[in-house]
Each structure stands twice: as structure tokens, then as C-alpha cells.
Amino acid sequence: MKFLKILISFLLILIISVYIYIETNLKTHIKIENITTTSDIDNDWINDIDDILDWSRKEVNNKTNYKSVYYDWWYPPQNEWVCTDLVRRAFKNAWINIKKLVDEDIQNNVHLYKRINWKPDPNIDFRRVPNLNTFFSRKAISLTTEIQPRNIENLKNWQVWDIVVFGKPKDHIAILSNKRNINWVPYIMHNAAPIPKEEDLLIYWHKNISKIIWHYRWKY
């Protein structure tokens, strides 16, 4: 009886060890290549994707405070922001002025922006998730919203600097990181309070907080 217990314990340890080895090997040896671009709008010798990625990670490290307040001078202070500000500021680092582009599109297509109710307000329109969603649906490439862990072909569609929009009950927007978990699902960089984070929450947020309603890639 004692021998049987020892044998069972040994087998359990062996099974766990093999599982950990396989998991580690999968994570180490299977790699989904990140997309890249030669586009360099600001001519800083850093391509636009890396510009956006680097700035997003910098803001995560800065731990900028989450604060949702209306300002009548357009931009919030540099030490505070909401989720949409991460996207705007990240794109600005590649000289892509999201505020200017959103304001222009609203002016020319006000009927498409349901959130503003025919009353554009340049102080806040560019900081609202539904407005950014409408804008990206018109100006970016729409991609799959289905996530299949460990499915390489599916996850090749989920790439660094892609934009993910979550719907009700909590409107939210995030940028995909170049980090991936053991199932090859990318991390998200976002600010959901109290500070911005880079974390493995893409599927968790989709299943437990708000579903992914759109997935975009900027036309670089």
C-alpha cells in the first residue's frame, strides 16, 4: 500500500513535470511573427508601429492617473487621462493626430456619429470611445473579433498596435502589445483605472467585463 502511494506520487510529479516542460517549450519555440512597416511619418528613424508601441509602454511605466473630466481647452493635463487618451497620445508619437482627424470626420459626416447627437464638441468628442469606434470603422482595417487561443492562424490576426474596442456595459479601448501569453494571445495596453497597465486581459475582459465589438488596424 505504501509502495502504491509512492508510485502514484511519482507518476503525478512526472506528469506535472512533463506538462511544464511542454508548456515551456511551446512558449519558447513557437513564435508568431509581429507585423512591421517601413512607414516613418515623423522621420525619426523609428517605424510608426514601434513609435506607437514604445510610447504606449512608456505611459504604462509612467503610471499616469486615470481621471475622467471634461476640459474646455481640449486636452487633459499630461499627468491624467482616460483609455482613449492612451490611443491618441500613442498615435501622436508617430505624428498621427487622432484629435484633428476625428474632428474633421465629424464635421464632414456628423450624421454617422451617434454619440454626439448632432452637437459636435471638439473639447470631448475625440475622448469618447463610441466616437473613436466610428472613426476607426471608417478609416482603419476591420479585423476578426474572434480569439482562438493556441490557434496560430487565428492569432496571426491579433498584432502589435492593433486597436481593440470593447462595448457595453463598459465602453473601453486598448492597444495590443507585442507580448503574448503562453497561449500566444497578446497582452493589452490600456487604462481602466487607476493607472495604465500592460497585462494579459484580452480574453478575460471579453468574457467577464465587456465583449470585444471591434478590432482595427491602422492603414499605415
Image (cartoon, rainbow, N blue to C red):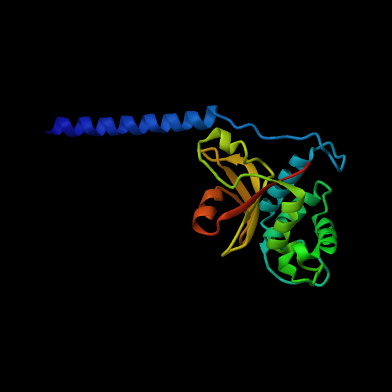
Residue 12 appearing in the image: yes
Q: Is residue 91 above or below residue 181?
A: below
Question: Based on the displayed image, in which of its 4 quarters is residue 12 positioned?
Answer: top left
Rendered image quadrant of residue 5: top left
Residue 196: x percent and y percent?
A: 64, 56
Q: Determine whether 150 is above or below 104 in the image.
A: above
At a point 39% along the width and 32% down the height, the residue shown is 19
Front residue (pair 34, 44): 34
Residue that protrudes farthest toward the front in the picture = 111
Q: Relative to residue 205, is residue 66 drawn left or right?
A: right
Please state, as top left, top right, bottom left or bottom right, where the C terminus lies in the image: top right
Q: Is residue 21 above or below residue 134?
A: above
Q: Quadrant of the N terminus?
A: top left
Q: Is residue 176 left or right of residue 211?
A: right
Residue 47, percent from left and from top: 79, 38
Which residue sits furthest right?
Answer: 43
- Residue 165: where, in percent of width, then height? 64, 54
Q: Is residue 77 visible?
A: no
Residue nearest the viewer, comparing 182 with 79: 182
Q: Is residue 43 found left or right of 87 in the rendered image? A: right
| x 63%, y 59%: residue | 172
Q: Residue furthest left?
A: 1
Q: Residue at x 69, y 44 (%)?
A: 161
Q: Relative to the observer, which residue lies in front, 185 or 11?
A: 185
